[in-house]
Image (tube, rainbow, N blue to C red):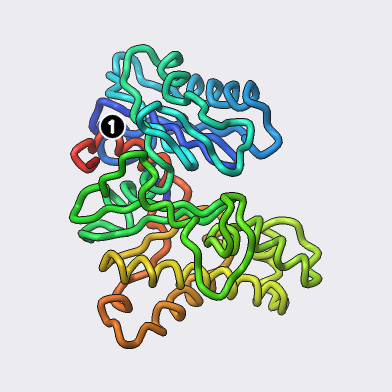
């Protein structure tokens, strides 16, 4: 259910920007973690886009979102969530699945568009975690991992009620944790990374090597719902890999909740079943098996709400 803005909700506002491997979005977010109606806008990104095209896409969504700002409403700041890796010290981003941007000065470019508000950058997975902790599936959890499973796999950590300290801004990037039993080569240079196994595009690619003729995660979802054996195996494989990564993370961090969003996380509820089953195998470690793996409580609004949390809830940042 959308947490749409309604008249009389608290002001001022934050401008939230979410930059990912297939799209960039912007919206205005109020102090209760709700999007201002009519302020959400999207443009495509993608591996084939040039740097000028990507800059133009960001300008378009920022301008469109700000156009929806109610008259005389203060803008507290701009929160930017970006696919990683990022560099907090220099305000740059190098999204693995967007090769045109390496060390791209996204904070500087955003500041040039919004002169009257400070810009705060964090990795998109942390934004997911902050959103779920603030108003989503992680409310009340002291230790939680937020994950996005989409074009890539990202993550962020809230430990002891605060974002985990991270000198470069990349803590919690679970997509590049190597998971046991898989040897898929990853663009980061690793082998068996969670992103290489369980992201939407890589899961579809694996299925196609086994005769699947669809091309997208949506195609795979339809085939899975129809009982196609290759689609069933592909979702089981991805879910099992996610479960292995969650179990490893819970062993290290004693997690209460893992909240998972992103487009491919909605391929089938079975994805979560397989992840939970993989965690349940750690029978000798009840502190691991106690972790709850749940879908995002915010649907596809989570990344924007989390970017808004960078402005509205700065006390959560380490």
Q: Is residue 26 above or below residue 33?
A: above
Residue at the front extreme, as displayed: 189
Which is more toward the observer, 163 or 91?
Answer: 91
Image-quadrant location for residue 122? top left
**How many numbered marks, from 0 up?**
1
Q: Quadrant of the C terminus?
A: top left
Is residue 120 at all visible to an observer of this figure? yes
Residue 34: where, in percent of width, then height? 34, 40
The residue carrying mark 1 is 311
Q: Is residue 250 above or below residue 42?
A: below
Which is more toward the observer, 11 or 239?
Answer: 239
Is residue 67 at all visible to an observer of this figure? no
Residue 219: where, in percent of width, then height? 71, 61
Image-quadrant location for residue 310? top left
Which is more toward the observer, 35 or 154?
Answer: 154
**Residue at the spot x=43%, y=59% of the render?**
260
């Amino acid at each position: 259910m959308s947490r749409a803005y309604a008249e009389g909700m608290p002001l001022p506002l934050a401008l939230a920007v979410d930059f990912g491997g297939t799209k960039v979005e912007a919206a205005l977010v109020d102090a209760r973690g709700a999007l201002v109606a009519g302020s959400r806008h999207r443009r495509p990104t993608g591996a084939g886009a040039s740097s000028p095209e990507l800059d133009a896409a960001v300008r378009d969504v920022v301008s469109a979102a700000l156009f929806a700002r109610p008259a005389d409403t203060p803008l507290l700041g701009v929160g930017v969530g970006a696919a990683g890796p990022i560099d907090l010290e220099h305000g740059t981003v190098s999204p693995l699945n967007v090769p045109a941007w390496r060390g791209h000065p996204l904070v500087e470019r955003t500041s040039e568009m919004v002169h009257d508000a400070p810009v705060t950058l964090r990795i998109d997975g942390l934004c997911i975690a902050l959103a779920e902790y603030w108003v989503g599936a992680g409310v009340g959890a002291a230790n939680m991992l937020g994950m996005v499973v989409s074009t890539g796999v990202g993550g962020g950590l809230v430990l002891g009620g605060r974002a985990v300290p991270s000198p470069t801004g990349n803590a919690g990037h679970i997509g590049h944790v190597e998971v046991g039993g898989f040897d898929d080569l990853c663009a980061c240079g690793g082998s068996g990374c969670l992103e290489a196994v369980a992201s939407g595009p890589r899961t579809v690619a694996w299925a196609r090597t086994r005769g699947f003729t669809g091309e997208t995660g949506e195609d795979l979802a339809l085939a899975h719902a129809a009982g196609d054996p290759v689609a069933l195996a592909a979702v089981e494989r991805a879910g099992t890999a996610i479960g292995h990564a969650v179990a490893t993370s819970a062993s290290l961090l004693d997690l209460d909740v893992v909240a998972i969003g992103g487009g491919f996380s909605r391929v089938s509820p079975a994805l979560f079943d397989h992840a939970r089953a993989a965690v349940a195998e750690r029978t000798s470690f009840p502190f691991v098996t106690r972790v709850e793996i749940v879908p995002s409580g915010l649907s596809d609004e989570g990344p924007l709400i989390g970017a808004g949390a960078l402005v509205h809830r700065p006390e959560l940042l380490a």
